[in-house]
Image: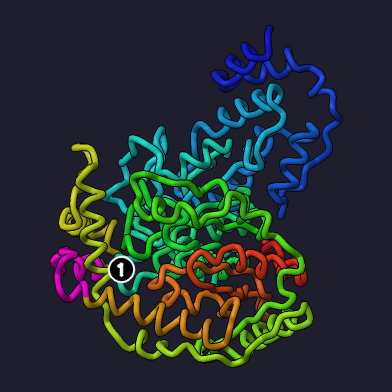
Amino acid sequence: MSKKKQFALAAALTGATAAVLTAGMFVRREVVKRRPFAIEEATISAMQRALKLGQITSTDLVQIYLDRIEHFDRKGPKLNAMLELNPDALHDAEACDVKRTVTPNVGPLFGIPVIVKDNLSTAGKMHTTAGSVALADYIAEEDAFVVKRLREAGAIILGKANLTEFANFMAENMPNGYSSLGGQVLNPYGASFDVGGSSSGPGAAIAANFAAAAVGTETSGSILSPASSNSLVGIKPTIGVVSRGGIIPIAHSQDTAGPMARTVRDAVLLLNAMTGVDEEDEETVWSRGDIPQDYSVFLKRGGLKGARIGIDRHYTASLSDEKVKIINRALETMKTRGAAVIDPVAIPSSDALENRQSCVMYQEFKWDLNRYLEQLPADVPVHSLQDVIAYNEAHAEAALKYGQTVLEKSERMSGDLGEQRYLIDRADDIRLSRKEGIDAVMKNYHLDALIFANATGSDIAAKAGYPSITVPAGYTDAGEPVGITFTGMAFDEPKLIELAYSYEQATRNRKAPDLS
């Protein structure tokens, strides 16, 4: 049989048929002596090496992760990180194993299991719910653009992760990680620690080694917060780097998807696969010339040398003394690696941003969610924000443990993006976060990046649409993770990756949680 025919056959195979072909047609690969593969803290590169050497298969990887999820998410500590598993994951893995024998030179994500947050649409047999009981039976007709890109890269979608319901835009007193559909996500480092939100499920799942990496989403802190809380690397990209197509929205001016992983390199490999021009998302079209072809070239161990980094101590004022010491230790490490740390700097607009009420997110949420829901099939019970509120009221025992005050406030808005108040508030958001905020402090002090503890600076960066990367900085004596976040200006991802990778390699702070 020609290689072309073999590939065509392999591409169509799933299940036991693929396994039989693997055992029969490609016998040589099966004689490689297998060694136990340590899945905990395994990087994507390590998995790919083991796959290429035949020490493990993608089917093995998927099964190992499924076993861990069964043991630690459904039983054991019952982290509640996962909402749903992909029933085709093993079949997809078997097909990858067969394809690999025909085309061994595959990309870095080929055959690698990843998780996506359950506000990203997935076609097939999995649901897309945003954690809401109102959307419990909804199955999307097509993948979100980001999910399409991951599948094209050969990644295996292992399942959908739990989240703070409607990405934490439902109720003012809803705890991070709670959804009416999935319950409360717990932090694998300790149930008493905040799990962060709204990408709580991806954060807990990757920290607990339930997959190689995950896709989260952020409107204001929803990647950076759970990444910091779960000792992960989280990249919140510049608006326009990653498409928003097919993602249940909050606010289009701030929404983005981004990678969450255990190492900077793994997060960058995922980011590479996620980027791309989506003709349905104008922000990605306008950003076409600002996105590097490969972010991994910026993984430089010496990235801190000669860098100028500033920290505004206003954003550490609410931290405990112990956490401030961890941040100070991180700054000292950066100095030893050749960075100039300007301490303190002052973001001119920080007080003004904190002391004002903007209608932007509420107006955009009503507008964006109504546009998303109105396209859903007729058998889905909700097709507007008003429908969601009514459904929740009719099913209050299941849906309204913490109420829906944010949904109700949004519904009271006009949803008119031409309204004067909205236009003024949006203009003020941009002015205060950019020109009089991050741009001003970066230019005044000639900085390459700003430093924040955990996700404390996420709001100003979110309003500006600017990128941030958080990496593990250490742990309190009680074992609670602390992250340190690098923030820059628009499309500064290359510089932030250099800084974050250099710091990570100098410290190797991350430790796996003890799930026993």
Residue 249 x/y as whole percent:
32, 56
Looking at the image, can residue 78 be seen? no
At horizontal 33% and vertical 88% (from top left) the residue drawn is: 355
Name the image quarter holding residue 339. bottom right
Residue 314: % across, % down: 50, 91
Q: Is residue 437 above or below residue 55?
A: below
Q: In the rendered view, would you say 300 is above or below 8?
A: below
Q: Is residue 414 magenta?
A: yes
Q: Is residue 376 above or below residue 190?
A: above
Tell me the element at label 1. Answer: loop
Residue shown at 69% from the left, 84% from the top = 340
Q: Is residue 406 left or right of residue 14?
A: left
Q: Which residues lie in the magenta part?
A: 405-423
Q: Residue furthest right?
A: 33
Is 120 left, or right, of 337 in this rendering? left
Q: Can you give x and y, in whole percent of width and height, for residue 324 in the image?
A: 62, 87
Tell me which residue sits at (40%, 48%) in the image.
120
Q: Residue 223: within the magenta?
A: no
* Residue 10 in the figure: left or right of residue 444: right
Please tell me which residue is depicted at 67% across the width and 66% down the height of the picture.
Answer: 498
